[in-house]
Image: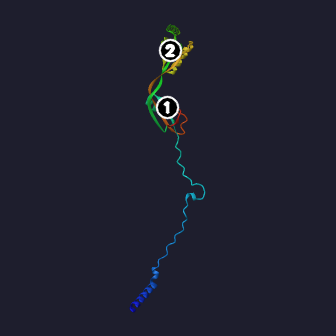
Amino acid sequence: MRILFLLLILINVAVYAWFDRYGDLMALPPPPSVPEVGRLLLLSERPGGPAPAVAAGGPPPRTRLCFRAGPFEDEAQARDWLAALPQPPRSQRMERRSTRVAAGYWVHLPQSLPLRDARRVLRELREKGVEDIAITPAGDGLYVISLGVYRLRETLEERRAELAALGYEPEVVERVKEAQRYWLTLEYDAPPPKELPAPARPGGPCG
């Protein structure tokens, strides 16, 4: 028992001596200090001030205007007109569709007469040197004196002046027909050209 007691004392002394010599090597360094971080603020808790600038959107889209031109008798005529424009369009589109076009001018005396009276007036006109005239049915047993059909406006005006000199005031009826014609749609960025040559129509927003 005494020997065991002495052995425990020797072990304690040895442990004490070891820690006394090597204890500093076993000491752990203190944890590094953490810098103080401020508390996060919600947006609603931020002090008042001007709102952050929001990036503005891109530039507004440029306005585009469209013009219609026509009718043209054929595609070549439409392309020649397009090539002669002083300011070419941003884009163009050609279409072919049925169109009511002038088919000449019919000139006749305004009165609707019974056949006997129409023949008398016809004879009077011929005696005055008027040619290319005829009696045309007007319906309900009545007739009118036809003074010709003219394709050109200039020829029509000459005929009307001839009859006016003889004391007659003829009526003019423009005749129309359906025909295939070509049309152009021209698109321009604003500002558009000040004017386009005929047969262009006034422009408007492109739809």
The colour style of the image is: rainbow
Looking at the figure, which quarter contains the N terminus? Answer: bottom left
Q: Position of residue 12 (x, y in %)?
A: 43, 87
Q: Position of residue 99 (x, y in %)?
A: 46, 27
Q: Residue at x 51, y 16 (%)?
A: 107
Residue 207 versus residue 149 in the image, above or below: below
Q: Residue at x 46, y 82 (%)?
A: 23
Mark 1 surroundings within 10 Å by alpha-carbon count, few (fewer than 14), some (14 through 19), many (20 or more)? many
Residue that carries the numbered disc 1 in the rendered image: 69
Three-letter residue code for mark 1: Ala
Q: How many marks?
A: 2
Q: Could you say which is closer to the camera, residue 144 or residue 189?
A: 144
Q: Nearer the viewer, residue 5 or 151?
A: 5
- Residue 8 seen from this side: yes
In the rendered view, tell whether residue 140 sits above or below residue 12.
above
> Is label 1 in contact with label 2 (beta carbons under 8 Å)?
no
Label 1, label 2: how far apart the Cα atoms are = 34 Å
Q: Is 19 in front, or is 117?
A: 19
On the image, the x and y values in percent for residue 154 come to 52, 21
Q: Earlier in the sequence, mark 1 or mark 2?
A: 1
Name the residue: 43% across, 85% down: 15
Q: Is residue 88 visible?
A: no
Tell me the element at label 2.
strand
Numbered circle sitting on residue 147: 2
Q: What kind of residue is marked 2?
A: Leu
